[in-house]
Image (cartoon, rainbow, N blue to C red):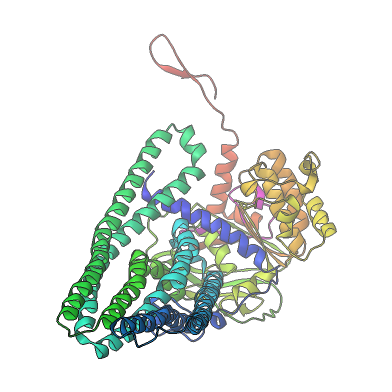
Amino acid sequence: MNATTARSRQASAIDRTIDAAIAAAGANDCATVDYQQLIGKPAKPGSFRDRFALTETGAHALVYGSLACAIGNFSLMLPMAVIWFAIARYVQHVSNPAIALPAFWPIVGVSILILAVMFAAQWWQYSATYNQIYGESARTRLALAEKLRTLPMSFFSRRSTADLTCAVLTDCANLEQLFSHVMPELFGTTISTCVVLIALFVYDWRLALAVAWVLPIAIVLLLISRNVQQTSAREFNERRLAVAAGIQESLECAAQLRASGQTERYLAGLDAKIDAAERTQVHSELVPGVIVSGAQILLTVGKASVILVGAQLVARGQVDFTTYMVFLLCAAMIYAPIAVLFESIAELMNIDTHTARLREIHAERAQTGAEVCTPAGYDITFDHVTFSYRDDAAGNDTADNNHASRDAQRVLDDVSFTARQGEITALVGPSGGGKSTVSKLAARFWDADHGVVRVGGVDVSSVAPEVLLRDYAIVFQDVVLFNDTITENIRLGRRDASDEEVLAAARAANCDDFVTHMAHGYDTIIGENGATLSGGERQRISIARALLKDAPIVLLDEATASLDVENETRVQSALSRLLRGKTVLVIAHRMRTVMNANKIVVLDHGRVVEQGTPSALLASNGLFAHMAQLQTDAQSWTLRTAHKISDGVSTDNNK
């Protein structure tokens, strides 16, 4: 199974899932959040906010959290004041017994006060980092979800499921960890360390130099590690996505792999991908790990240098013992948060990998439009429409997926026709002719390159997709169901529908025929994507959704193509109830399915080659008549068995 096939199937799976969600979106006036309100003012390209994919509120929260961390670090140094005072008085008392030791209770009182200040500072730090930053995590996820909701279908078709899953789940979770633990600590530690070092240099530059000399070297080592880490992280991310896509594909195609006897071969290839990802991960962690460990060892060397330099200065009488002890304590307090930060530095080095996908998604152009649509009727008009799949609009059309390359390929060329309200308009033609593309342009899954698609005289590209789709009910060949009850799967058509309305729609779609035989009836859980149901049963649930929505426009994409005769009869009966008085656009390969249509539009290589009533097209002896004749001839075909005869020539017994 090659990479092109794998990508095609992943994109097709996304198409089907998003199609189903969009088909139901118009009926569900659910509350949505405002994307611009979530992210605030747009970030300038290359700015701090842009690099770290922060919202405006999140950037302020990070600054607030960093200051809180700096103050928290300062508070941890307050006990040194008490220790310094106690040591100084004790040394003075030893050298001059006339100087009394400090009273016990005042020191206890000051210590309790310091503990209270430390507690308050740490509590503020906790609130400013965790509470504030987790709020940013929520905003990031909401903004990402809102952005995805407004993106065109072309985006989902060119991005793999694994890639989007990593962006929504893994990247957001990793950034949450970074912004709540690592980033505030980094900035806070930098601020507190710089302030303390300045104070130490003012107090005694020699001991301060003994404390600080290791820090520039450690920073240089970390920068070297960062370059190695980023290169390895990008490679590992690509391999990890390949593994995730392979695992997902193996689960989705388990039956096909087993039936073709290719399971072991496929799993061997998957094992190779996992091994490659493992090797890349080991390399991405080993080299930076060695360098970071070296930087941590340097901190220990820094402590040793303070001890040695301070001891020499004390021995020469250039520094008193109290100052020496203060610098030892300061070195320990400075190095402690830096050492903790080094333990998380690998996460910080990978931040560009995590933010890159989010930046790409937020940079995508959303499909926008008017929030109100008042068409003059529901005629669907294609007016000289031309459409091409490009790199930025690569699609995976279920009926047109035999195209090997979508780059700048013209799928529709100057298509013009009108599907009138109250009539059934059928789209027919050879595979790859553009039928499914026409239906999706009608629902604004994509926007036309040239020409206009109108509904009731309104250009669909001027209307917000969720507003436009309130007037659409869509029944796909590949039905997407959820691991929920039959009732809730049908209620997807209109979320505010009562149980009685859901049951009425189900009965109108002939769902009673199979639901009554289930132990829990309409409360039966049907498994992931309706795994416990047959194709006909799944299709009738999809039709029940459309009946419940009762939209004025109905799109049918090969709704009965894969059904047996009995199920097709029942589904056709349900469809007859759905289509009354609607604008209907139906795609079908079976000619008998469209013989009752009011109008047939024949598409071939993206162009309208014929249109008219079935009888008129049959009489014209064009492409439609040719396809109808081929299907009539095909109905007489039977399986044939060849037998050997004495002279070695095969003869056919079934004609």
User: Which of the 4 quarters of the picture holds residue 421?
Assistant: bottom right
Q: Residue at x 37, y 63 (%)?
A: 407
Q: Nearer the viewer, residue 351 or 74?
A: 74
Q: Is residue 601 magenta?
A: yes
Quadrant position of the C terminus in the picture: top right
Where residue 149 sits: x, y (%)? 56, 70
Which residue in the rendered view is the most extreme toward the bottom?
202
Q: Is residue 507 magenta?
A: no
Q: Is residue 265 visible?
A: yes
Range covered by the magenta-colored residues: 587-605
Image quadrant of residue 553? bottom right
Q: Would residue 478 appear left or right of 224 to someone viewing this image?
A: right
Q: Is residue 633 left or right of residue 316?
A: right
When the figure is inspected, residue 529 is found, relative to residue 440, above or below; the finding is above
x and y percentages locating residue 506 in the rendered image: 78, 52
Q: Position of residue 516 (x, y in %)?
A: 81, 42
Q: Position of residue 98 (x, y in %)?
A: 35, 88
Pick the front one: 347 or 608: 347
